[in-house]
């Protein structure tokens, strides 16, 4: 984790953390010693933020947290021989038996709107060292009440958990944007008694109460000025990606289109356990990343290794992840 800590120091300096952020940082530091006792790696980390300019927009990726999960070959490349998946991991300097999953909501400050894309786990993740979005917002110099729009790529628990705090909206000045197809699927009573029932209940608790303040969108619709939604289904039935453009500079927030920077990008056709329609998800992965690679646009992937932003170049039948360095700084 040394590289990650180094990156955190650098990104915090780049972000120009002000005095306002100090209490949050001190609180997080005070909890570090206690967390170390439980050797919970993610809980001992400060909220990490990655802030950069895109034209006249200011974008902040905030790490809601991360966790270590077992057996990557049981999540990615599930239609492959596990040895094939392990070899690709080894060839790319990664361990074969465990992997780290990151969760990165992002804030797009357009000057007229502050748009939060996805909300992390919220309170439900805090015992596991997740749910750090609120602390991260403070560290980046924002208050929850500054958020004017909350846009959701899809309605899985790690994206909607932060919508509510203590039974009330966490972003009380915000309106909401969600995909119509996505909302219709998860809010339907038809999900009862199916594998999607848990997701259905989470949507009833966190999204349905906000429906009055939600704009339900379809493919090609605007999220806010400068941001357009494009349907990229398969991970979930109405999963969307968001294209942001300012002064000719572009980034795509890819949500869960691809969730491992090696396994899912080098082999977009490999099946992923969490993709509900595996063939459709693979087709969306290829379509979205082919556009990103061809047009040489940056992307921000919700589960990409923090700082969660990079580029993709074509390699073989897939794409090689190229992490961002100083492209946005000069
Ligand atoms: Zn996710």
Image (tube, helix red, strand yellow):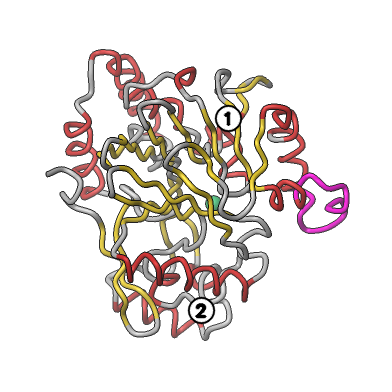
CA gap between label 1 and label 2 equals: 35 Å
* Residue 286 within the segment the image draws in magenta: no
Secondary structure of residue under mark 1? helix
Observer-nearest residue: 63 or 56? 56
Residue 64 on image: x %, y %: 44, 38
Q: In the rendered image, which residue does mark 2 sit on?
A: 269
Residue 318 is situated, as x and y percent measured from the top left of the image, at 39, 78
Q: Of 133 and 114, which appears nearest the observer? A: 114
**Is 47 drawn above or below residue 31 in the view shown?**
below
How far from the left and from the top, in percent, is residue 327? 18, 51
Out of 135 and 73, give the one closest to the viewer: 135
- Identified at 72% across, 40% down, the residue is 203
Q: Please determine whether, in this image, residue 286 is positioned above or below residue 239.
A: below
Is 187 one of the magenta-colored residues?
yes
Q: Nearer the viewer, mark 1 or mark 2?
A: 2
Q: Quadrant of the C terminus?
A: top left
Task: Name the residue at 21% across, 50% down.
Answer: 3
Q: Is residue 109 above or below residue 280?
A: above
* Tag of residue 123: 1
Residue 208 shown left or right of residue 10 in the figure: right
Q: Which image quadrant is residue 264 in?
A: bottom left
Estimate the x, y position of residue 196 in percent, counting from the top left: 76, 55
* Structural crowding at the residue carrying mark 2, measured as other residues with C-alpha within 10 Å and reported as few (<14), some (14–19) or many (≥20): many
Highlighted magenta segment, given as a residue range: 186-198
SS class, disc 2: loop
Q: Earlier in the sequence, mark 1 or mark 2?
A: 1
How many marks on residues? 2
Tags 1 and 2 in contact by the CB under 8 Å rule?
no
């Amino acid at each position: 984790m040394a590289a990650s800590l180094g990156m955190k120091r650098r990104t915090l300096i780049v972000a120009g953390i002000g005095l306002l952020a100090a209490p949050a940082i001190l609180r997080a530091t005070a909890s570090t010693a206690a967390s170390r006792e439980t050797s919970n790696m993610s809980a001992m980390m400060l909220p990490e933020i990655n802030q950069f300019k895109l034209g006249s927009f200011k974008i902040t990726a905030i790490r809601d947290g991360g966790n270590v999960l077992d057996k990557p070959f049981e999540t990615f490349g599930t239609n492959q021989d596990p040895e094939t998946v392990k070899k690709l991991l080894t060839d790319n300097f990664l361990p074969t038996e465990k992997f780290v999953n990151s969760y990165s909501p992002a804030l797009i400050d357009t000057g007229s709107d502050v748009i939060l894309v996805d909300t992390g786990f919220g309170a439900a993740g805090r015992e596991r060292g997740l749910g750090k979005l609120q602390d991260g917002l403070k560290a980046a110099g924002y208050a929850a009440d500054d958020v004017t729009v909350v846009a959701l790529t899809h309605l899985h628990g790690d994206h909607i958990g932060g919508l509510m705090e203590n039974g009330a909206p966490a972003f009380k000045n915000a309106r909401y944007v969600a995909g119509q197809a996505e909302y219709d699927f998860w809010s339907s009573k038809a999900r009862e008694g199916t594998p999607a029932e848990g997701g259905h209940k989470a949507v009833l608790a966190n999204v349905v109460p906000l429906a009055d303040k939600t704009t339900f969108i379809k493919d090609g619709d605007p999220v806010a000025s400068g941001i357009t939604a494009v349907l990229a289904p398969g991970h979930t039935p109405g999963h969307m990606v968001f294209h942001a453009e300012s002064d000719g500079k572009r980034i795509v927030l890819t949500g869960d289109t691809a969730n491992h920077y090696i396994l899912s990008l080098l082999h977009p056709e490999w099946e992923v356990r969490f993709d509900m329609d595996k063939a459709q998800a693979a087709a969306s992965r290829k379509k979205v990343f082919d556009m990103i690679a061809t047009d040489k646009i940056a992307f921000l992937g919700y589960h990409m290794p923090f700082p969660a932003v990079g580029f993709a170049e074509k390699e073989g039948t897939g794409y090689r992840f190229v992490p961002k360095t100083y492209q946005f700084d000069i």
